Image (cartoon, rainbow, N blue to C red):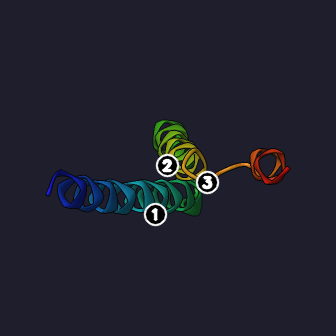
Amino acid sequence: MLDKCYVNIMKNVKKYDYLLVLLGSVAAIYAQAGAQQNTLLLVLGIVFLMFGLYRIYSTIPSKKEEEKNEF
């Protein structure tokens, strides 16, 4: 039962990671769309984007680790 609960929590966390990437992308694009660039919004958008990507990529296993485990 604990495993099912953990899996559900991790699925929700992954959704939030993708949401961070989406919000960061939209904010960064919106900040550069105007004639006068909003630097704070651009920086915050890039921070959200990079943080979301970091969290997504940290869950993907490395190929080098898989090759070491095969032998």
Residue identifier under label 1: 22
- Image marks 1 and 2: residues in contact by CB distance under 8 Å: yes
Residue found at x 48% / y 53%: 24
Disc 1: CA contacts within 10 A as few (<14), some (14-19) or many (>=20)? some
Residue found at the very far left of the displayed protein: 1
Residue identifier under label 3: 60
Q: Nearer the viewer, residue 26 or 55?
A: 55
Disc 2: CA contacts within 10 A as few (<14), some (14-19) or many (>=20)? many
Residue found at x 29% / y 59%: 7
- At numbered mark 1, what does the secondary structure look like: helix, strand or loop? helix
Measured as percent of width and height from the top left, residue 65 is found at 76, 45
Measured as percent of width and height from the top left, residue 47 is found at 52, 39
Q: Amino acid at mark 3?
A: Ile
Q: Nearer the viewer, residue 38 or 20?
A: 20
Quarter of the figure with the N terminus:
bottom left
Q: Amino acid at mark 1?
A: Leu
Select label 1 or label 2 by which is in front. 2
Specify which label sits upstream in the sequence, 1 or 3. 1
Residue found at x 61% / y 54%: 60
Find the distance from the CA under tag 1 to the CA under tag 2. 9 Å
Measured as percent of width and height from the top left, residue 20 is found at 41, 54
Q: Amino acid at mark 2?
A: Gly
Q: Nearer the viewer, residue 21 or 41?
A: 21
Depicted 63 relative to depicted 51: above or below? below
Select label 2 or label 3 by which is in front. 3
Specify which label sits upstream in the sequence, 1 or 2. 1
Checking the image for residue 52, the label placed there is 2
